[in-house]
Amino acid sequence: MKKVTVLLGFIRFNLASKLEFYRNVIANLTANELFTKPDVELIVLNAAIAKLAADFKAAQTGLHEAVAKMRQSEKVADNLFRIIAAYVDRICEW
């Protein structure tokens, strides 16, 4: 029997798609009885997404400082969602 695992391909999404994907993940985890105690609180994930979205909007000006800030926020969000992916993989292990 083949083991099902979570894929981390979302890391390569463009930023607009990544924000949409991250919001969808949070929506699916919210009030889900299978995932009651995630390794990262949903409030922390929401805050990271809000910061990333704000930094993404600010980076549209093209200023190097704004783009660097956006990339840093993206790294933080990506790492948090890697942790959530590992959590889901661990909980759903057969």
Image (cartoon, rainbow, N blue to C red):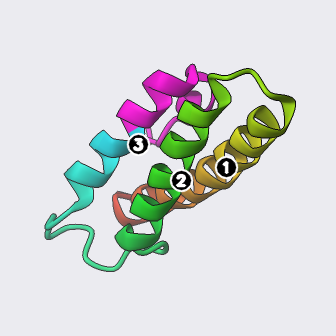
N-term mark: 1 or 3: 3
Q: Secondary structure at mark 2?
A: helix
N-term mark: 2 or 1: 2
Question: Could you classify mark 3 by the number of other residues whose Cα lies within 10 Å: few (under 14), some (14-19), or many (20 or more)?
Answer: some
Magenta stretch: residue 11 in it? Answer: yes
Magenta stretch: residue 68 in it? Answer: no
Mark 1, residue position: 73
Q: Does the residue at mark 2 contact the one at mark 3 (Cβ under 8 Å)?
A: no
Question: What's the residue at 67%, 49% (across, down)?
Answer: 73
Residue most toward the right? Answer: 64
Give the total number of marks visible in the rendering: 3
**Residue flagged by tag 3: what amino acid is it?**
Tyr
In the drawing, does residue 94 fall left or right of residue 79? left
Q: Secondary structure at mark 1?
A: helix
As rendered, which of 66 and 24 lies closer to the eye?
A: 66
Which corner quadrant holds the N terminus? top left
The stretch in magenta equals 1-21
Mark 3, residue position: 22
Mark 2, residue position: 51
Cα–Cα gap, marks 2 and 1:
7 Å
Q: Nearer the viewer, mark 1 or mark 3?
A: 1
Cα–Cα gap, marks 2 and 3:
13 Å
Question: Could you classify mark 2 by the number of other residues whose Cα lies within 10 Å: few (under 14), some (14-19), or many (20 or more)?
Answer: some
In the drawing, does residue 71 fall left or right of residue 4? right
Which corner quadrant holds the C terminus? bottom left
Residue 1 appears in the figure? no
**Residue flagged by tag 1: what amino acid is it?**
Ser
As rendered, which of 9 and 44 lies closer to the eye?
A: 44
Query: In x, y percent, where is residue 9?
Result: 57, 27
**Residue flagged by tag 2: what amino acid is it?**
Lys
Q: Does the residue at mark 2 contact the one at mark 1 (Cβ under 8 Å)?
A: yes
Q: Is residue 20 positioned above or below 85 on the image?
A: above
